[in-house]
Amino acid sequence: MKKLFLLYFVLFGCLSTAFTQGLAVQVSGKGPKIILIPGLASSGEVWDETVAELSKNHECHVLTLPGFGTNPKIVMPNGFLSTMESLITDYINTQAEKVTLIGHSLGGFLSLKLSRSLPDKISRAIIVDSFPFYSAAFNPAATEENMVAMATQMKQLMIAQSPEQYRAQQEASMPMMTTNKEKLPNAVSWSLESDRETTGQALYELMTADFRDELADVTTPILVLGAWHSGKAYGLTEESAKKTFESQYQLANNVQIEMAPTAHHFIMWDNPEWFIEKVSAFIK
């Protein structure tokens, strides 16, 4: 699954990999800095094709969060989201200039939080199919409090499943996340390689964290790239999906929302040309 170092070197010219306080970080390219954060149980390799384009003119820092993919888990006494925000904050603070954040799913949620806490360090944030309150996107009546029971149940079920049950569940659910059949096995493999307790805790916290009101404090320009096509068979339309995004981001001071044409959750895999076009235009 992992590409050879030599291939990376040929593609990107200059590449280094390091582990920083639990974060696996891969750096390639030269120019203004971009930090890319993958989603739940994903490896930083999810950004390979994106980085192949962006690293032509930018220095790309690709993170793999601890406990995801083959990156070992760490102790998180303060919880998942708080720990990740702290680790990424420390990493951003080592950079000598402002950075652009690109975050997918869980990585998008973290990018929103970081944009609020580090306004002087982040020039812009690109949020890939993520919401400030994940649960409310599917249940408008959701609150942090009334989602605790369901989130707890989902976390416990995830951890209690046998390896065979968990594999079957991942293989059944992942096709809803991407139309890219070549990439689909990667997403399944990363989820199986990830530490299940870390994944379960991250999912629990994401389901019970409402960041909508805090968006009013975010001054960083935000581009939101949303997906809707996986719900088309269930009556979802581009217009209805965009209304959900607009409702969730209504308190943001400077936000632009674009809906991917035919992508499922992994927009950068399913509509790659559209994705790069929107990202490049926003960065410029």
Image (spheres, rainbow, N blue to C red):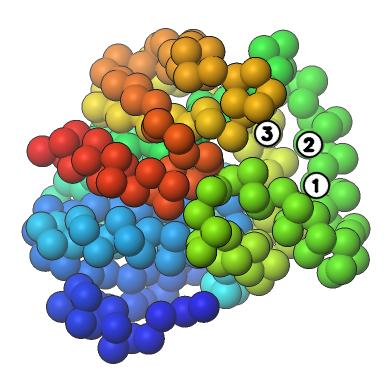
For marks 2 and 3, give the CA distance: 6 Å
260 relative position to 168: left or right: left
Q: Which residue is mark 1?
A: 155
Camera sees residue 86: no
- Residue sitting at x 60%, y 20%: 236
The amino acid beneath tag 1 is: Lys
The amino acid beneath tag 2 is: Ala
For marks 1 and 3, give the CA distance: 10 Å
- Residue sitting at x 87%, y 50%: 157
> 10 Å neighbourhood of mark 3: few (<14), some, or many (≥20)?
many
| C-beta proximity under 8 Å, tags 1 and 2 | yes
Camera sees residue 271: yes
- Secondary structure, mark 3, is helix
> Which label sits on residue 101?
none
Mark positioned earlier in the residue sequence (1 or 3): 1
- Secondary structure, mark 1, is helix
- Residue sitting at x 68%, y 33%: 207
Q: Which residue is mark 3?
A: 207
The amino acid beneath tag 3 is: Met
129 in relation to 70, above or below: above
| C-beta proximity under 8 Å, tags 2 and 3 | yes
Mark positioned earlier in the residue sequence (2 or 3): 2
> 10 Å neighbourhood of mark 1: few (<14), some, or many (≥20)?
many
> 10 Å neighbourhood of mark 2: few (<14), some, or many (≥20)?
many
Which is nearer the eye, 270 or 150? 270
Residue 199 in the image, given as x and y percentages of width and height:
68, 55
- Residue sitting at x 15%, y 78%: 13
